[in-house]
Amino acid sequence: MTADIERPVEFNPPRQTTRILAIANQKGGVGKTTTAINLATALAAIDKNVLLVDLDPQGNATTGVGLDPREQTASIYDVIIGQAHLLDAVRPTAVPKLSLVPSSVDLSGAELELAPLPRREAHLRRALDGQAGTWDYVLIDCPPALGLLTLNALVAADAVLVPLQAEYYALEGLSHLLRTLKGVKRALNPRLDLHGVVITMFDRRNNLCQMVAQDVRSHLGDRVYETVIPRNVKVSEAPSHGKPVLLYDLRCPGSQAYLRLAKELLVREAAGLTALAS
């Protein structure tokens, strides 16, 4: 990780009414933003108030729900550097009960701006403190890197959900990420847990996908969600229409998988199945 995680940080009392989940994987192209958008939509569809925070400078979660980052008066960048209040940046979406804090191209330079500031890793947490209770869930779409923006998400989060493509190098990258999560938990955020690993872009006809899924499950057991997200053309098409796949085609296999994932997430929450693997 490029950011220092050795300095202790003070914490406010933990939130009881809102769960903050970081959607993170340092590897790009694993379905991270797709999972953030569609899991948020699925939770909203089952009557949860959800805030999606687009912390990725690419802004794909913002465009994926139909908003143009260039047209927003305030973004998560303004919130993190202290130029705007969180509520000033919250935007409604076409999905009832789902709101968004949009990204901005300015985020690409945010790490340099945050680096010399005190408690640089806790700016997002401070922005959420006192406001997150407005929603049942806050989902943070992290950039595909383990830098200062992702560190802010991990310090703010209660737990981390890791989308993992069923491919050859999956376990190697996952091991690195889990070591980082344990370091953040030890040094900066004692409440941080692994919510689970979600296997994405899964093709049941592909023997390699089957082998990787079995390998991940053998290492992490019930930390791996039973729900898998299949490769599905509708999931790939939906972002070009500025819609979550659940709005684009509710009946397609991808939409149904994300609804199952949301329901499994709630079951896991109720059962307390969130802990970092040893």
Image (cartoon, helix red, strand yellow):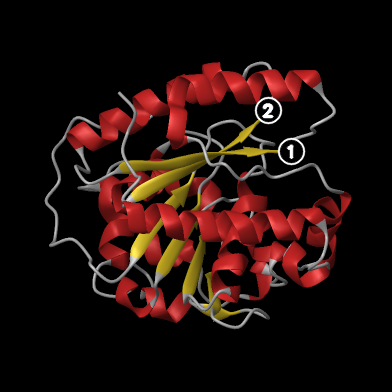
Whether 182 is drawn above or below 40: the answer is above
Residue type at the position of mark 2: Ala
Q: CA distance from mark 2 to mark 1?
A: 7 Å
Report if the CB atoms under discs 2 and 1 are less than 8 Å apart: yes
Judging from the image, what secondary structure is the residue with disc 2 in? loop
The residue nearer to you, when weighing 132 against 110, is: 132
- Quadrant where the C terminus is found in the figure: top left
Residue at the disc numbered 1: 201
Q: Nearer the viewer, residue 200 or 269?
A: 269
Task: Residue 254 in the image: state x and y as whole percent.
Answer: 76, 54
In this view, the residue in front, 113 or 202, is: 202
On screen, residue 118 versus residue 259, left or right, reads left
Q: What residue type is disc 1 on?
A: Met
In the depicted structure, whether residue 221 falls above or below residue 129: above
* Quarter of the image with the N terminus in it: top left
Q: Residue at x 37, y 56 (%)?
A: 269
Relative placement, left or right, of 220 versus 226 is: left
Query: Where is 58 relative to 278, above or below?
Result: below
Q: Position of residue 69 (x, y in %)?
A: 65, 67
SS of the residue under disc 1: loop
Q: Which residue is mark 2?
A: 166
Q: Quadrant of residue 144?
A: top right
Image-based side of 91 in relation to 276, left or right: right
| Residue drawn at (85%, 28%) of the image | 205
Q: Position of residue 112 (x, y in %)?
A: 41, 42
Residue at x 69% of width, y 69% of height: 65
Taking 153 as reference, is 13 left or right? left
In the rendered image, is residue 102 in sight? no
Which one is earlier in the sequence, the residue at label 2 or at label 1?
A: 2
